[in-house]
Amino acid sequence: MPPTHPSHWNAIYQKSQPEKLGWYEAAPQPSLGLINACNLPKDARMLHVGVGASTLLDALLEEDYSELIACDISEEALLKAQDRLGAEARKMTWIVDDLTDPNLLAGLAPVDLWHDRAVLHFFTEEKDQQTYFDLLRKLLKTGGYAIIATYNLEGVDQCAGLPVKRYNAHMLAEQLGPDFQLVQAIDYTYYMPSGDERPYVYTVFQRVVFSTVLFSTD
């Protein structure tokens, strides 16, 4: 089964509550701090890819960000987030889609922020990585920010029963290309609910030039 198959992730969220999962954050740092440091207006369009049932959504709503788009391949994950948020969930846009074979995302209006915590590293095939970065370049406005957090080169080689690809800031910059400027890169050790350590790299890139992206979902 490919890592992008929704049944893999739906089964995980059906089996366990979000706070028991290995990537759960009670306090969504450093993502929240990096987003705030971008100094985007409260009505900036923010796309959170592979968001799962993240508590980051709650925190951003509490800070009055009003144009939040939550995307995940797992409908079950998004339903759990919606259930937790209750009436607040109606303030957001929810999209079930596959970053490596985008349908709804391919037609999305441009965004000011692309935020990915712990999704990219699951794409171990070059073609899937290419589709991911093509989609990012297609959707992110000039002047907008891409925040990408992934396992760093000291990280594990498997997660959620799947192999992963590890990165450093230079590797991510190469994938994004010359239209993007690295603003910040930090190594960060995440502690799982079990107490195990997971080394990440968090990167912030700003788009400085917009080049036409030839993108196809064929």
Image (spheres, helix red, strand yellow):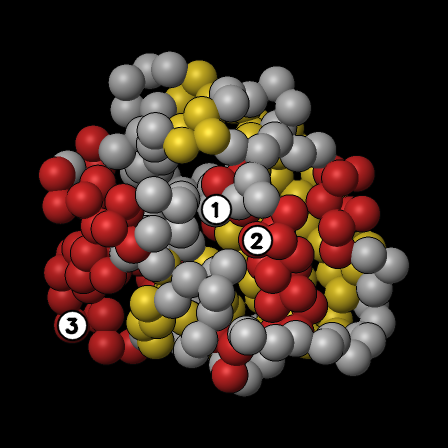
Q: Is residue 148 above or below residue 61?
A: above
Identity of the residue drawn at 55% across and 22% down: 155
Amino acid at dot 2: Asp
Residue 211: mark: none
Amino acid at dot 3: Ala
| Mark-to-mark CA distance, 2 and 3 | 35 Å
The answer to whether residue 63 is seen in the rendering is: no
**Mark 2 highlights which residue?**
128
Amino acid at dot 1: Val
Q: Residue furthest top?
A: 196
Q: Can you tell which of label 2 and label 1 is closer to the viewer?
A: 2
| Mark-to-mark CA distance, 2 and 1 | 12 Å
Q: Residue furthest right?
A: 178
Q: Is residue 65 left or right of residue 39?
A: left
Residue 87: mark: 3
Q: Is residue 162 left or right of residue 53?
A: right
The answer to whether residue 162 is seen in the rendering is: yes
Q: Is residue 94 left or right of residue 138?
A: left
**Mark 1 highlights which residue?**
119
Crowding at dot 2, Cα within 10 Å, few <14 / some 14-19 / many 20+, comes out as some
Tell me the quadrant of the picture where the C terminus can be found: bottom right
Q: Position of residue 180 (x, y in %)?
A: 80, 59
Q: Is residue 75 above or below residue 32?
A: below
How many numbered discs, if any? Answer: 3
Crowding at dot 3, Cα within 10 Å, few <14 / some 14-19 / many 20+, comes out as few
**Which comes sooner in the sequence, label 2 or label 3?**
3
Identity of the residue drawn at 66% across and 65% down: 134
**Which comes sooner in the sequence, label 1 or label 3?**
3
Identity of the residue drawn at 84% across and 72% down: 209
